[in-house]
């Protein structure tokens, strides 16, 4: 296993720049997730790592060695694709063993490696089957087995669970994470699914328009988003945003918006225009809460209820316990712990959390 360094990396297709002077470090043995919406550049970055796309500018280092001009076959990287890419006329054994066989490894060594991988991935009983005789999850494990036997210094996953149903995705998340814990191989995993990122990553790299918005452990991005983009992207349902201002009254600071006045728990600099972020799970029904609204829709999710509320501040969502007796058309008051309030510069969308009063 090896570390990975992206040093001022850029990628352009003609006049379209899709990666913009990106710098990032992935430590040896780390499970890093590249997260972002379609078109943000995450798959392009992964393909540049594998050598499937050329680098327009900057350097890529794997294990301290510059890889820019090295052929993909010489990088000792194993990649698992979204569509499995299995050979339909080959049985599972031969699909897993193919890269070893073309490198002329001895038959006994090939069998040992394939059987070891199959044991780890619970594929031993399927080695004599064809891909068409397997479920989607089993096919994905075959693709993972093919990567494992190569004894690569780096694993790359390109949205490997996108074609699976929700239950199978949850199962495969656990399997991939357990596989990483067992092998310890440095892994870079691409997904647009924040649940995958939050549950699997040692480190999340949230990308937007070819740039990195924030890097950190999952809790960092959820609890301390550095920008409004991060706050909006991480969390389900998405964070509520309310435009307002910070005002000082008798030495205390308040966030003020139409129909809303919240005392601030920390000393944020007074700003003419700010945006407050309120996570649905941080809103609670209180008899004397500062925010009044009318329930437009009660959305049951099983464990919780998402209340879609029309307030003076606009449409917001509050997530409450399934036992809460609230229905469509009800009027209620909501409170929020000031320590859970996120404040962003209205113009640039940057967090004001570390901006102190002068």
Image: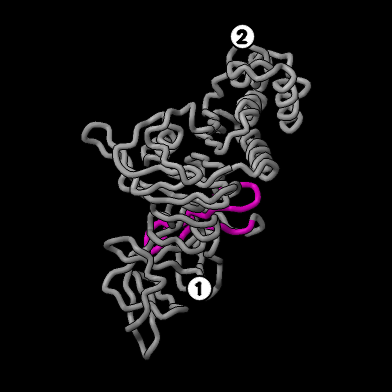
When the figure is inspected, residue 287 is found, relative to residue 221, above or below; the finding is below
Q: Characterize the magenta stretch by its predominant secondary structure.
A: strand
Residue at 41 percent of width and 80 percent of height: 267
Residue extending farthest bottom = 250
When the figure is inspected, residue 83 is found, relative to residue 16, above or below; the finding is above
Residue extending farthest left = 15
Q: Which residues are magenta?
A: 294-321
Mark nearer the N terminus (2 vs 1) = 2
Q: How many marks?
A: 2
Residue at 59 percent of width and 12 percent of height: 88
Q: Where does label 2 land, which residue?
A: 89
- In terms of secondary structure, where does tag 2 sit? loop
- Is residue 208 covered in magenta? no
When the figure is inspected, residue 160 is found, relative to residue 267, above or below; the finding is above
Q: Pick the residue in front: 129 or 339.
A: 129
Q: Is residue 78 left or right of residue 315?
A: right
């Amino acid at each position: 296993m090896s570390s990975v360094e992206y040093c001022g990396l850029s990628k352009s297709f003609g006049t379209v720049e899709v990666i913009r002077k990106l710098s990032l470090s992935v430590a040896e043995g780390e499970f890093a997730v590249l997260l972002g919406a379609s078109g943000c550049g995450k798959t392009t970055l992964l393909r540049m790592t594998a050598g499937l796309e050329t680098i327009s500018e900057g350097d890529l280092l794997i294990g301290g060695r510059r890889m820019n001009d090295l052929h993909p076959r010489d990088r000792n990287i194993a990649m698992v694709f979204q569509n499995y890419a299995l050979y339909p006329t080959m049985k599972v054994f031969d699909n897993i063993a193919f890269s070893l066989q073309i490198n002329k490894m001895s038959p006994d060594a090939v069998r040992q490696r394939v059987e070891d991988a199959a044991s780890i991935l619970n594929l031993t009983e399927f080695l004599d089957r064809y891909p068409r005789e397997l479920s989607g999850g089993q096919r994905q494990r075959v693709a993972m087995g093919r990567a494992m036997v190569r004894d690569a210094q780096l694993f790359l996953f390109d949205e490997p669970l996108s074609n699976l149903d929700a239950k199978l995705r949850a199962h495969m998340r656990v399997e991939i994470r357990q596989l990483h814990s067992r092998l310890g191989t440095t892994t870079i995993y691409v997904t647009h699914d924040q649940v995958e990122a939050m549950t699997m990553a040692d480190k999340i790299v949230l990308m937007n328009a070819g740039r990195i918005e924030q890097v950190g452990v999952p809790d960092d991005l959820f609890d301390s988003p550095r920008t409004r983009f991060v706050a909006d992207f991480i969390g389900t349902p998405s964070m509520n945003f309310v435009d307002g201002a910070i005002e000082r009254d008798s030495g205390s600071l308040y966030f003020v918006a139409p129909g809303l006045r919240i005392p601030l728990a920390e000393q944020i600099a007074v700003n003419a225009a700010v945006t407050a972020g309120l996570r649905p799970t941080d809103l609670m029904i209180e008899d004397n809460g500062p925010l009044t609204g009318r329930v437009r829709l009660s959305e049951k999710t099983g464990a919780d209820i998402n209340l879609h509320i029309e307030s003076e501040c606009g449409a917001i969502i509050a997530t409450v316990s399934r036992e809460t007796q609230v229905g469509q058309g009800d009027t209620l008051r909501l409170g929020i712990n000031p320590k859970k309030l996120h404040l962003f510069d209205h113009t640039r969308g940057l967090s004001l959390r570390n901006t102190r009063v002068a």
